[in-house]
Image (cartoon, grey):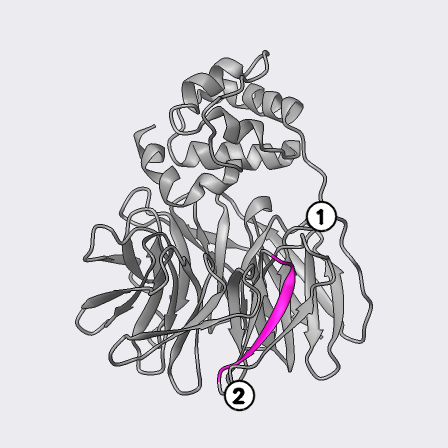
Amino acid sequence: MAGSRLLWPLGAMALFGASAVQAQPQLPEGPGKAVIEQACLGCHEPVRILNSGYSRQGWQNVVHMMLNVGAPVPPDQVAGLTDYLAKNFPEKPKPAPSLITGSAHVEIKEWMVPTPGSRPHDPLAYPDGSIWYTGHMANLLGRLDPHSGKITEYHPDTPSSGPHGLVADRDGNIWFTGNFAGYIGKFDPKSGKFTNYPLPDPNARDPHTPLFDRRGMLWFTVQGANMVGRLDPRSGEIRLVKSPTPRSNPYGMVVSSHDVPWFCEFGANKLASIDPETMAIREYALPNAGSRPRRIAITPDDVIWYSDYARGYLGRFDTKTGEVKEFASPGGANSLPYGIVYLKRAVWYSESGVRPNTLVRFDPATETFQTWEIPSGGGVVRNMMVTRDGNIAMAESGVNRVALVVVE
């Protein structure tokens, strides 16, 4: 399990919940316990498993994610292990969604991806109408044709890359963050060739969200290392700078109409801008010290909307004036707002803390909400992207699906 020993500290530990404590409780007796002791405890403290809770389908997904990163579970013991986990660590209660009707109409279409335990992380709405996604735990990029339902998978040359965020350049190349292996990757769909750009600092672990500015420069956050980076595709040069606030966890990113990158600090109550030339970072503290903005969207007039994951709020930040306004999310304080986009004069995001997850629409003009249940349950929508024809692509990691929200 050498591969997964490397991976867990970098990005996947949240699958099993809380961090370890000094006094370790014991796993329940029963078939499957020995498999966990042999195959899992080399990477996980028992408390991570004991504090977890999933449906049987959810445990199937988690077990396959572990198999994808090298967990040494014999094939004939996978079903027994899943049964043991589902019996002893069942799904825990979550808040029910608050369903609000309104005038907007949507249709949510979903497709199961081929590789079990892929953990689709980020979607990419490609110009030809296809939807690409990162298979975070299966070391792959996937392409969905929404018309035929066909999904094609492509595997990076580097094992255990942990593809995370992805974005396309003007020439149609797909760039992604190798979250586990510490590099920026480029994939040419025409030739099928992968190219790696290793991060120059060995401490720059956990590259996260990539985004192009209008000049063709690639910007990206490096959450675990508390850094932000810039890659020049013409030369391959990479520059890295530290976020001023320690452990601020740079996360989601957008680019303003003036070509200024902005990012949110998931480990702090701050948003930040980056000088495109000097890479100097300027931080803007949000009013509530408990705010933890996780993803952000930006309007044509440079207003940033953020999903406050910790407090269950939708926030509005005016980049011109610094004014902040907040709105309680319909699902409440534990709704965990996450993936977010701006589309058709409205803010759209997902609540990942309610069951089933919801798609939420907020109209800034009337300051009203509308919500829909995600049919499959959602399984945490970590990111969204607007398509060229005005719809929304989503990745649903916990249910191993990719979705398209058709906005009528």
Image spot of residue 107 (x, y percent): 71, 65
Asked if 399 appears above or below 63 in the picture, the reply is below
N-term mark: 1 or 2: 2
Give me the residue at 29% from left, 75% from top.
280
Disc assigned to residue 301: 2
- The prevailing secondary structure element of the residues shown in magenta is strand
Which quarter of the rendered picture does the C terminus lie within? bottom right
Read off the magenta span.
Answer: 311-319
Image quadrant in which you'd find residue 173: bottom left
Q: Is residue 152 left or right of residue 193?
A: right
Q: CA distance from mark 1 to mark 2?
A: 34 Å
Query: What amino acid is found at the position of numbered circle 1 in the picture?
Result: Arg
Give me the residue at 78% from left, 58% from top.
98
Mark 2 closeness class: few <14, some 14–19, many ≥20 residues within 10 Å: few
Residue located farthest toward the right when viewing the structure as drawn: 101
Image spot of residue 68 (x, y percent): 42, 36
Image spot of residue 106 (x, y percent): 72, 68
Q: Secondary structure at mark 1?
A: loop
Query: What amino acid is found at the position of numbered circle 2 in the picture?
Result: Asp
Image quadrant in which you'd find residue 217: bottom left
Q: Which residue, given by chain and number where applicable, does mark 1 sit on?
A: 355
Q: Is residue 65 left or right of residue 369?
A: left
